[in-house]
Image (cartoon, rainbow, N blue to C red):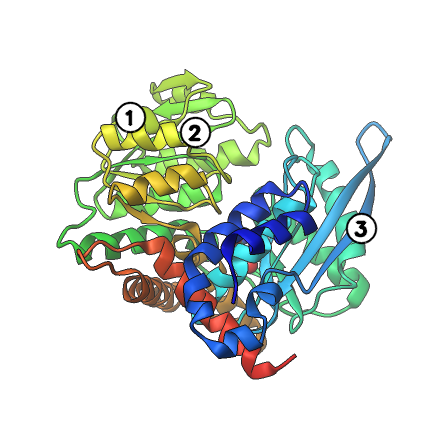
Amino acid sequence: MYELASFMAGLERRNPSQPEFIQAVREVVGNVIDLVNENPQYLDARILDRICEPDRVISFKVEWEDDGGHLNVNRGWRVQFNNALGPYKGGLRFHSSVTEGSLKFLGFEQTFKNALTGLPIGGGKGGSDFSPRGRSDAEIRRFCRAFMTELQRYIGPDTDVPAGDIGVGAREIGYLYGQYKKIRVENTGVLTGKGPLWGGSLVRPEATGYGTMYFAQEMLAREGDSLEGKRVAVSGFGNVAWGAVVKAAELGAKVVTISGPDGCIIDEDGISTPEKAAYMLQLRASNNDVVKPYAQRFKARFIPGGKPWQVPVDLAFPCAIQNELTLQDAKDLVAGGCRHVIETSNMGVCADAAEYLIANKISFAPGKAANAGGVAVSCLEMSQDAQHLYWSADEVDGRLRNVMKGIHASCVEHGRCDDGYVDYVKGANIAGFCKVADAMCQQGW
Ligand code: GLU
């Protein structure tokens, strides 16, 4: 039998200074421990001990030269967390906050997220503490080449398929793929998020943002409601926020905020025109990591150091980074009338804030369910690459919608409470966990 306190104490002892990993595990284990204790097969397989331990953590040195001719040294990692359901799959993050512990949390989350998609992909994550902020295009290229020179030994289209994440977009994937091919001389689906001219899938850039809106649509439809006419807060301004803003506008909602490390934009006219969405992409491509220029360009409000959660809205979509929405932010959102929080960044909502939302019966979708559209379309990209074919945008978008519908249904099935409230966190954790745990049991040890 497992006991939560002693299991977590052991985990903390074995993983010192990795608070985000501990936080992610606590949430999942807290939701599944009773189910595990009632299932002798899981107990015999010591499933919790095994599922919370990454298969391997690969760490390497990345040496690269900046524009001044100086040598720089960064750390790179690939966490191959669990391949019970398929090849390791998950993004690469280039950000100053990246540590081994943060990648372990992300790889752990990814394992259950990927399971929820219903597609044959295991969980992994990688990245570097390299920060692209303020770096020239040539510096980013040299860094990507040096990073892939190391990483290429450990990945392959049937073993481990990285993709983008924070700081890694189409440009970086291009440089990484170019270097992989230089060394391995093969054109395969070893990375996803590739350019549409060289094996990339249509709708992959939009997929995470579109997927989270499709998930929100499902949540609202279950309550007999829709996104039409809703006020929406989005945080972040990168690829995920962009896709969410574009799809929200298409579905008749009005996104009034985006944010960056420098502060928050409030645009009461709505971030709804193609010109505004295109400008978000320009801001991201500038490598400056700021949103203030949006305010000057479109005569919107800019709050230096501010966050989007103090603005009254119907729905909130944290789309930036882990633990971005605090308990106070959650209280402010609820006080402002918000009834739906759709976590789109990985673990974007702090643990106490998530507890507050659930205790107050706010519909709260966890990232591993709501943001799974990105990795789902990555898997569709793998399918197209394996067949040496391209599918149309409509074909990919249709499959994405179905995946999001399926994830929503699984959350409702496993998270429905007696009073009709759906605990989406519990539903997602149980549904994702059972798939991975069953596959592990069937494959033996
Ligand atoms: N980085 C994204 C995620 O967190 C996408 C991963 C992928 O496409 O493999 O799910």
Residue at 51% in and 58% down: 3
Q: Amino acid at mark 3?
A: Phe
Q: Is residue 229 left or right of residue 21?
A: left
Q: Nearer the viewer, mark 1 or mark 2?
A: 1
Amino acid type of the residue that numbered disc 2 sits on in the rendered structure: Ser
Residue that mark 1 sits on = 311
**Residue at the disc numbered 2:** 259
Q: Is residue 202 left or right of residue 92?
A: left
Graded by Cα atoms within 10 Å as few (under 14), some (14 to 19) or many (20 or more), the crowding at tag 2 reads many
Q: In front: 91, or 389?
A: 91
Foreground residue among 194 and 340: 340
Question: Alpha-carbon neighbours of circle 3 within 10 Å: few (<14), some, or many (≥20)?
Answer: some
Give the side of residue 119 with respect to residue 49, left or right. left
Q: CA distance from mark 3 to mark 2?
A: 33 Å
Percent of width and height locating residue 26: 50, 51
Q: Is residue 93 above or below residue 307?
A: below
Q: Which badge, 3 or 2, comes first in the chain's sequence?
A: 3
Relative to 401, is 30 on the left or the right? right
**Observer able to see residue 92:** no
List the residue tagged with mark 3: 60
Q: Quadrant of residue 441?
A: bottom right
Give the mark toward the camera: 3 or 2: 3
